[in-house]
Image: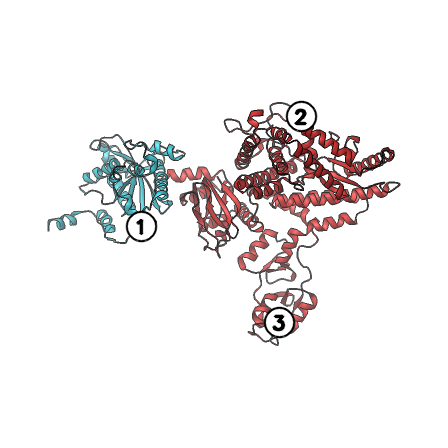
Amino acid sequence: MLTWLQHKDYPEFWKKYQSHFKNKTEYNLNTARFVVFDTETTGLNRKIDRILSIGAISTIGNTMDVADSLEIYLQQDMFNSETVEIHGILKEGNTTKYEEKEALIQFLDYVKNAILVAHHAAFDISMINECLARQNLPKLKNKVLDTGLLFKKTNLSSIYKDKLYSLDELCKLFGIKKHDRHTASGDAYLTGIVFLKIIGELSKTRKTTLKSLFNNPNRRGLL
Amino acid sequence: MKNTIAERIFDFLKDYPPFYVLPKEELYTVSKNVKVVYLQKDQHVFKTDEKIHDHFYVVKDGAVGIFREQDHTLVDECDEGDIFGLRALIRKGNYILSAKAIEESILYSISSELLEKVINTNAKANKYLLESFVANIRNPYSTKNKDSLFTQVEGLQKKESHLTEVQSVQYSKNPITCSSNTTIQEAAQIMSSNRIGSIVITKKEKPLGIITDKDLRNKIATGQFSIQEAVKRLMSSPVITYPKNITIAEAQIAMLQHSISHLCITTDGTLNSKLVGILSEHDIVVIHGNNPSVLIKEVKRSKTDKDLKYIRKKTQQLLEGYIAQNVPIFFISKIISAINEAITKKTISIAIEEMDTPPPTEFSWLAIGSQGRKEQLLLTDQDNALVFDNLSKEKYAQTKNYFLSLADKVTKKLNTIGFEFCPANMMASNPRWCLSLDEWKQQFNNWITKPDEDKIMLCTIFFDYNLMYGNKDIVNEMSESIFESIGSYTIFLNFLGLNALKNPPPLSFFRQFLVEHSGEHKDQFDIKARALMPLVDAARLLILSHAIKDFNNTVLRFEKLAEIEPQNKDLYDSCINAFKTLLQFRTQQGLQQDNSGRFIDLKSLNKTDRLKLKRCFKPIKDIQELIRVRFNLSQIL
């Protein structure tokens, strides 16, 4: 009863987002929609720091679709939100900046029930969850994959089992030319390529399914 | 909304044809709708007989091979900036070839629908795409230099007019017609008495419909229609019409799009004007294949140097036309060499007639160097030699004098015709290169067993000989003697190997072109010495090491090598591709600058061309490495 009441309080955009998860279609590695994303933030403290921008691109099978991508910049001047109310949208250069809530609306509308992919995903996810919390909303419902952890499943990483690989290191390892590093969209794109290469690498040696991606790499016996 | 990824894709595409002709906004729209495809090595993009995708592809990173499935032939290799899968633009049918990643690759896939919208408003881009598509279907073997087409699109119209001058017919100008009430039987009789494969049904001289052999086969022989019925029941109608100035490319596209084999040519290009001709698929084949034979026939008919000079000039125009239409370079070089050979033959026979007496003994006229390898496309200088049969000492002086004066005549005539004298005097008129069979054998034996730098250099020129005129047995005996000498003195091959490595791969450590440091051609790239010769030398060395005769052409030599050493097939194939591309480059340069095309001003090349050129250098590096290892040259070096 209580949860039902709570549900009712949620804004339309959240309900719409939630509804995507009622779709019970079975997806496999070639049909599932992945959204590879990255956030740029003011710092690494999830409580204090804020998201500056979100970049995301969708991937189905071995194809990233530029037409299905998202690039949003967030209004930072928290205490000046009144001026935003007045001017509506603040312009700086050519980039439109959005209020946190509007950015969330766009993000949720965009990701739907896709599987989220990010490098060191825990941080990006928690930053989004903090935004959601500030809007009195629950956490993201999407499944999440971390390219940092996925990489550890490949044979390439076996030498340094406990090492944490940065996106830069992975790009170097995979021979990816870096563009627009440290912009959310640029990093999302690079993460996307890394993601596809990891899947490719994994499929080389063993049968890789959507499910196997979510297995914990540390459970691989005592190897 | 800002779109960083699309901007990056835009930055990439804008350097390549046909995208660089698109206005900024249009290209940005295209970029925003690109799909980025990741391929592992050996993963297919599409396979033969697969239904056409609604996308075509641009290679961003890596390389994609286009294969003919039946025999797994690599038809083309696409890398950075190359477009493939353009068949998607005709939106019909299935892929004819397969596309597979040769190495790990990233592709940009672009919706054909979107691009169609764009190119409909952009004639330049449209033309480029259609032309390269046609270039692909015309000959799926060489599409290496696809985008060179684009740079020449402007000049195309002009050059085609040269071509038509060479061509006898473009389409059948007196189409056979009948009225719509003619019976099928009568129509078929008209067709067979005129030996034609189609008949146009007209009304007041305007085309109504068409009947082809195929209709008779499919609709009459099967009993679907009686032969007594009127043709109007059987004919395909309406017909596809075009104006007189239709280009070959347009015609091919039209036939493909409508799956037909005949186009009607009318005065104004519509159904409502007078029928003036019929263009059949066969005519197109003829246009592509028949000109050279017309020229060769003319050579045979000609009586004076002047006639030959005129034909040689026409050959040059034919060459320009071929290059402009992106006809595969190997095909071009075969044709041009055949014509040059015919001209040389004719010249020699004219010269012999002018001599007071017939030749006192058997002899052979040899083309040497690039002419001998049949790789001479532009009007470079003549290199030739003469060998005459052995004879008694008493007669020697007289005979040699006879052949020297004959050679003098021939070389002078060739000079008039357009093959300039060789500045190094490597001509049959030089007493050093006009010798008896035994003298040649001794000379070759001397070069092989006592090699020094000069002699090795002479070997590289004289070993590539080709009989132009005269006795074949003499030449065979000479070849055998060479192989005998090499067989008895194998270290010669190591010396030849050293020579083949004389010119290192043309890229510096920092992947910059090595250019000439001084002299007249300072800062220009010597495509002959730095890129073509290393491949030519390598092919010659390797084929000699296998003691194989009669393979004097670099491409043929590499093909033969690939056959003998299947383990190195990939390398040899890439050498062939590189060689063809380089030859095409040189020919284009030569045509543009009206010289031998040897030196290329790198600044005059666009980025794509520079990349294409650079790409040819890897095989050079690899083949030199192979030679270094196989002939143990690191020890000698």
**Which amino acid, mark 1?**
Asn
> In the rendered structure, the residue with mark 1 lies on which chain?
A
Q: Which residue is drawn at 67% across and 71% down?
A: B189
| Element type at mark 2 | helix
- Chain painted in red in the figure: B
> In the rendered structure, the residue with mark 2 lies on which chain?
B
Q: Mark 2 points at which residue?
A: B453
Q: Residue furthest left?
A: A1
Q: Do labels 1 and 2 share a chain?
A: no
Q: Mark 3 points at which residue?
A: B180
Q: Mark 1 points at which residue?
A: A28
| Element type at mark 3 | loop
Q: How far apart are marks 3 and 2 (CA)?
A: 79 Å
- Give the camera-side residue of B124 and B479: B479
Q: In which quarter of the image is the C terminus of chain B?
A: top right
Can you tell which quarter of the image residue A54 is in?
top left
Q: Which residue is drawn at 75% across and 44% down?
A: B472
